[in-house]
């Protein structure tokens, strides 16, 4: 009887230890999951039109822009300080600033982007009215490639940024700010095993992705270039190369600007598009 009792006690002890171990292990797993969920940064977006409707843009300030890159002359605007707006709406201490892009979403699908770190070092303003606009209008007309338009609802301007430096973006018709990881597009769109296509990818990132998407990633002002059919599957390659160099030679009042891309660079972009035609995913 004593032997049976001892065995029973040992078994109960082992079961108890196993239960405690299981409980601690489960708790550790839960804690890890909670910690991971806290460390995952959700996508951040600011709806500028909504903020304006709630009078949350900030103080109305008149700013002067010398050599405005859109109007090509000195301009004055009613504007809100874009840095103060960001700091009021977002806790930047929780953002990995060095590895984040700020993306400017426009009405027509144009999505230029720049380094958030660079943006925070500039003096950006969100212009919402042109001081020189004709009576009854918020903006002086913009004439671009024979097309007439205005900057409504917002035009992003800087009082101390070089107008010819392409790292600084001056989009108009802006409706939202988005924060995205710098690695997001690279992980999804960068060729993994083709040095030739890599050159075209670098050019595409610099010149094309603000207007065009590949596999659903990129701007929406121009057509998606890879899905469901790649542009390389229905354009003649030689004509596609020439079109990228000089769009206006193919279409009257074309929206796509002449970007200063050389024929060799255009061929490299087309090589990248051909590579991606074999890597469709959406």
Image (tube, rainbow, N blue to C red):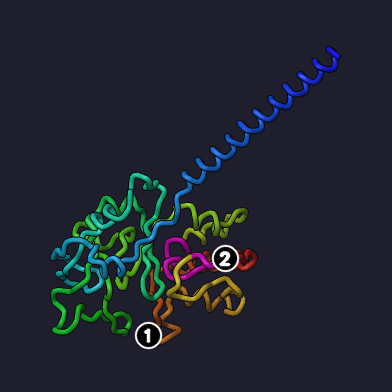
In magenta segment, residue 200: no
SS for callout 2: helix
Tell me where residue 232 appears, x and y as whole percent: 59, 74
**Sequence-first disc among 2 and 1:** 1
How crowded pointer 1 is (Cα within 10 Å; few <14, some 14-19, many 20+) is rated as few
Residue at the far front: name it: 1
230 with respect to 94 (left or right): right
Tell me where residue 268 appears, x and y as whole percent: 52, 64
In magenta segment, residue 206: yes
22 with respect to 128 (left or right): right
The region drawn magenta spans: 204-217
Q: Which residue is mark 2?
A: 271
How crowded pointer 2 is (Cα within 10 Å; few <14, some 14-19, many 20+) is rated as many
- Name the one closer to the observer, 225 or 117: 117
**The C terminus is located in which quarter?**
bottom right
The circle drawn on residue 253 is 1
Q: Is residue 19 above or below residue 152?
A: above
């Amino acid at each position: 009887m004593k032997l049976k009792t001892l065995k029973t006690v040992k078994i109960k002890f082992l079961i108890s230890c196993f239960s405690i171990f299981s409980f601690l292990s489960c708790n550790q797993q839960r804690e890890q999951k909670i910690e991971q969920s806290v460390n995952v940064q959700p996508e951040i977006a600011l709806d500028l039109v909504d903020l304006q409707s709630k009078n949350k843009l900030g103080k109305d300030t008149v700013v002067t822009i010398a050599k405005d890159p859109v109007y090509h002359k000195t301009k004055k605007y009613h504007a809100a300080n874009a840095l103060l707006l960001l700091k009021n709406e977002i806790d930047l201490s929780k953002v990995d600033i060095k590895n984040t892009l700020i993306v400017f979403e426009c009405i027509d699908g144009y999505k230029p982007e720049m380094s958030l770190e660079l943006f925070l070092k500039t003096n950006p303003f969100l212009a919402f009215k042109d001081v020189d606009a004709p009576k009854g209008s918020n903006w002086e007309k913009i004439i671009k490639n024979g097309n007439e338009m205005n900057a409504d609802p917002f035009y992003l301007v800087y009082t101390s940024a070089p107008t010819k430096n392409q790292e600084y973006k001056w989009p108009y018709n802006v409706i939202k700010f988005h924060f995205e990881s710098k690695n997001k597009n690279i992980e999804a769109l960068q060729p993994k095993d083709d040095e030739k296509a890599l050159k075209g990818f670098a050019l595409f990132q610099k010149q094309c992705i603000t207007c065009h998407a590949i596999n659903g990633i990129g701007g929406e002002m121009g057509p998606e270039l890879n899905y469901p059919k790649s542009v390389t599957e229905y354009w003649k390659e030689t004509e596609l190369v020439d079109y990228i160099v000089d769009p206006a030679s193919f279409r009257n009042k074309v929206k796509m600007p002449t970007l200063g891309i050389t024929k060799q660079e255009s061929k490299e972009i087309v090589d990248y598009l051909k590579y991606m035609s074999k890597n469709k995913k959406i």
